[in-house]
Amino acid sequence: MSLPLPLEGLSAIVTGAGRGLGRAEALELARLGAAVVVNDYGQPGRDGSGEASAAPAEEVAAEITAAGGRAVAHLGDVSDFETARGLVDLAVAEFGKLDVLVNNAGILRDRMVFSMSEDEWDSVVRVHLKGHFNTTHFAAVHWRGRAKAGETGVYGRIVNTSSEAFLAGSAGQPNYAAAKGGIVGLTTSTALALARYGVTANAICPRARTRMTEDVFAGFAEPAAEDQLDPLSPEHVAPLVGYLASPAAARVNGQLLVVHGGMVAVVERPRVAAKFDTAKEAFGFEELDGLLTPYFAERPPSETFAATEVLGLKKG
């Protein structure tokens, strides 16, 4: 007799699941036994341009069904509040309840801060940060409502997608980096608010070679042989999402994890590096100058994030 799958009997939503990371995550959740709502807006441009299409979500849902799983496709832009409501409603209508929410949908409109337009800022923050909030809000309403109605053992998992652009900076992506930082704040707040209802919320910072990052990782080493897995394959990320969605991760809450190429790192919350107290009633300019200027002068300059160093990859 075979053992039950880790996510058997659970239902999940994965946003932006028509391609890349979201697709890999949806397939992994299904492989682990979950019924999946595959959400995608299906626009061909990574900047959110082009006509919306149901085809990417439908293809992934069909792939899950063909493998013996349960899935339904959903065409919609999660940055729209009512669309997010309908997405959660669909999961409940199709599968009876919602257990897992994986927020992955996003777009890029890269430009230096001095060249960025208001629309380029607003659109990226809207899709990433507001999109995460919208689905989280309606999922939280669902779980809290069940708990308030007296249901015992409510189960909820949220996995959000942040980025190392927030951790280390990304000069040409002020909108993206800000949105990804906001997602971490949303995650930790949600983790505290929903823990009492049996819900956890965590965020990942993945690295993967996808449509969104094709130029970022252009030229980095690819597998030497056809049977070797690309160190930047989304398939390196999906298992962590499956784990965080599972009962095994019940004690993992409010965490930020970096994942890529066979590596998972748990990121600590910021710690105080140095502390200065005034010798007087209140600081003045001269005292701050005498304390802070020497301190920063002795510190090495901030290191620029270099994917080659951390990933062990080489260009060319």
Image (spheres, grey):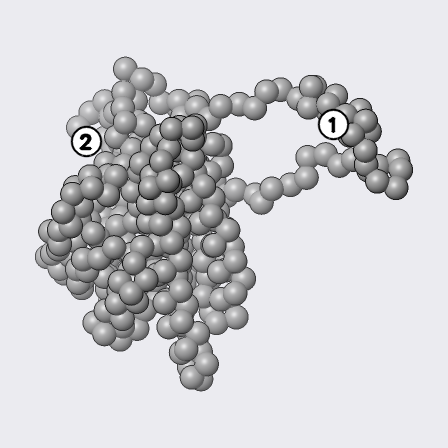
Find out whether the residues at labels 1 and 2 contact each other: C-beta distance under 8 Å. no
Which x, y percent locates residue 72?
17, 63
For this rendering, which residue is in front, 113 or 212? 113
Kindly give the residue lying farthest to the top in the view shown.
316
User: What is the quadrant of residue 46 in the picture?
Assistant: top left
Left or right: where 233 falls relative to 126: left
Quadrant of the drawing holding the C terminus = top left
Quickly name the residue at label 1.
292
Residue 275's tag is none
Q: Is residue 233 visible?
A: no
Left or right: where 149 falls relative to 301: left
Tell me which residue sits at (46%, 26%) in the image: 305
Which x, y percent locates residue 241?
35, 51
Tell me which residue sits at (81%, 27%) in the image: 286
Question: Helix, strand, or loop for circle 2?
Answer: loop
Q: Residues within 10 Å of mark 1 (few under 14, many from 20)?
A: few
Residue 263 drawn above or below residue 112: below
Which x, y percent locates residue 282?
84, 40
Kindly give the residue lying farthest to the right in the view shown.
280
Closest to the camera, between mark 1 and mark 2, is 1
Q: Earlier in the sequence, mark 1 or mark 2?
A: 2
Tell me which residue sits at (64%, 41%) in the image: 271
Quadrant of the drawing holding the N terminus = bottom left
Which x, y percent locates residue 211?
23, 36
Q: Is residue 145 visible?
A: yes
User: What is the quadrant of residue 118 in the picture?
Assistant: top left
Q: Residues within 10 Å of mark 2 (few under 14, many from 20)?
A: few
User: Which kind of residue does numbered mark 2 sit on?
Assistant: Asp
Kindly give the residue lying farthest to the front in the view shown.
118
Quickly name the residue at label 2.
227
For this rendering, which residue is in front, 84 or 287? 287
Residue 242 drawn above or below residue 223: below
